[in-house]
Amino acid sequence: MARLVLCEPIELYNILNQVTKLSRLTEPNYLCLLDVRSKKEYDESHVITALRVKKKADTYLIPESVDLECVEYCVVYDSNTSCLEAVLKDDDDDSDDDGGGKSDDSREELVAGAAIECGRAVSHLTRHPVRILKGGYERFSAIYHFFRTQKIIWMPQELDEFQPYPVEIVPGKIYLGDFVQACNPKIQKDLKIKAHINISMETGPLGPGPTSRSAKTTCVQIGALWPRCWSGRRLFSETLSQTSQIHSTDLCGPAMGPENPCLRASYG
C-alpha cells in the first residue's frame, strides 16, 4: 500500500508544468488529479485536468478511465485539508442557555478530511505515494488563479496545445523558463514578473514585456558570451555568478529546465 504525503501548492504547480517536447499532461500515465469536493463546487471551478471523484455511501468511485497502478503522480484535493491528521469535529454546535458551554447532547469525534479518506482508498491501487494537496483547492486557487477552469473534458489535441508556465524555484520570487515564455505577456502578468535574466542563446528584446516602469531586463555573462538584452529605457549588463547552475530541486517539486533557459524574477 502506498503512503500519503502532503503536497505543497508549488509542487502541484511544477508537476502541471513539466515539459519534454510537449506538455507531460499529454502522457496518460503521468498525472491523476482527483477532486473530492461536491459537484456544485467542482462545476464552479477546479484545477485544470482534475477529475471529480463521486462518493456512493462510504465508497469513493474512482473514474474508470484512470489506471492508478501505472500513474506516476496521484494528487487528491478537497476544499482546505491542511494536514494528514484527523480533526476534532463537534456534532452539536448548540450551546447552553447561558452560553457558558456545550450542551449535554454534544459529541466530539475525530474526522479525517475528504481528501485523506479518498487518498487512503486509492493508496491500495498505486505503487507511488498519494499526494494530498495542502490547503486544498482554496489555497492553490488563491496562489495560481490562472489554473482554475470549468472545463471538464480535455481532448488530446487540447493537451498538445497546452502552454506550460515556467517552473517555480523560489515561491513567488524566481522562475525558470525558456525564451518563448519570457516573451509571453500573459505569463508575465499572471506571475507578476518584474525582471528577467537571459542566460539563453537567444538574443533580442524580451517583449512585449511587463508594463511597469520598474520592470527591467538583466543580462548575464556566461564564459566569454554576453547575450544582449534590452530594457524599456536603457541597455545594460550584469554578471551573476554560477547562474548556469541554478535549477529547480525536489524541494520545489519535480522540474525540468528548458533547453534555452531564461530566469525570471519577481521581487516583492
Image (cartoon, rainbow, N blue to C red):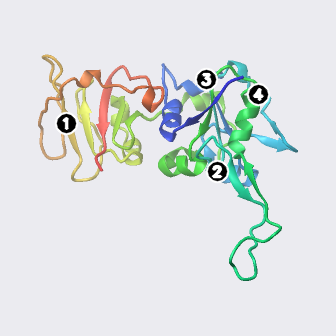
**Mark 4: amino acid:** Ser
In the structure shown, which secondary structural element does the residue marked by tag 3 occupy? Answer: loop
Q: How far is the residue under mark 1 from the one under mark 4? A: 47 Å
Label 2 near label 4: C-beta < 8 Å? no
Q: Which of marks 1 and 4 is nearer the N terminus?
A: 4
C-alpha distance separating marks 3 and 1: 35 Å
Badge 1 marks a residue whose secondary structure is strand
Residue 40 in the figure: left or right of residue 245: right
Q: Earlier in the sequence, mark 3 or mark 4?
A: 3
Give the CA distance from mark 4 to mark 2.
Answer: 24 Å
User: For the point 76% across and 72% down, which residue is it?
Assistant: 94
Where does residue 258 sit, x and y in percent of width and height? 38, 23
Q: Is tag 1's residue or tag 2's residue first in the polypeptide sequence?
A: 2
Q: Dot 1 corresponds to which residue?
A: 218
Mark 1 Cα-neighbour bin, 10 Å: few <14, some 14–19, many ≥20: many
Foreground: disc 3 or disc 1:
3
Quadrant location, the N terminus: top right
**Discs 1, 4 touching: Cβ within 8 Å:** no
Q: Pointer 2: what residue? A: 79
Q: SS at mark 4?
A: loop
Give me the residue at 71% from left, 82% from top.
Answer: 98
Q: In which quarter of the image is residue 76?
A: top right
Write down the residue under mark 3: 30
Q: Is residue 254 left or right of residue 181?
A: right
Mark whose residue sits in front, 2 or 3 = 2
Which is nearer the eye, 3 or 122?
3
Looking at the rendered structure, the kind of residue marked 2 is Ser
Q: Mark 4 highlights which residue? A: 65
Q: Which of marks 4 and 2 is nearer the N terminus?
A: 4
Q: Which of marks 2 and 3 is nearer the N terminus?
A: 3
Which residue is at a point 30% across and 29% down the rendered structure image?
A: 262
- Horizontal arrangement in the rendering, residue 259 relative to residue 214 (left or right): right
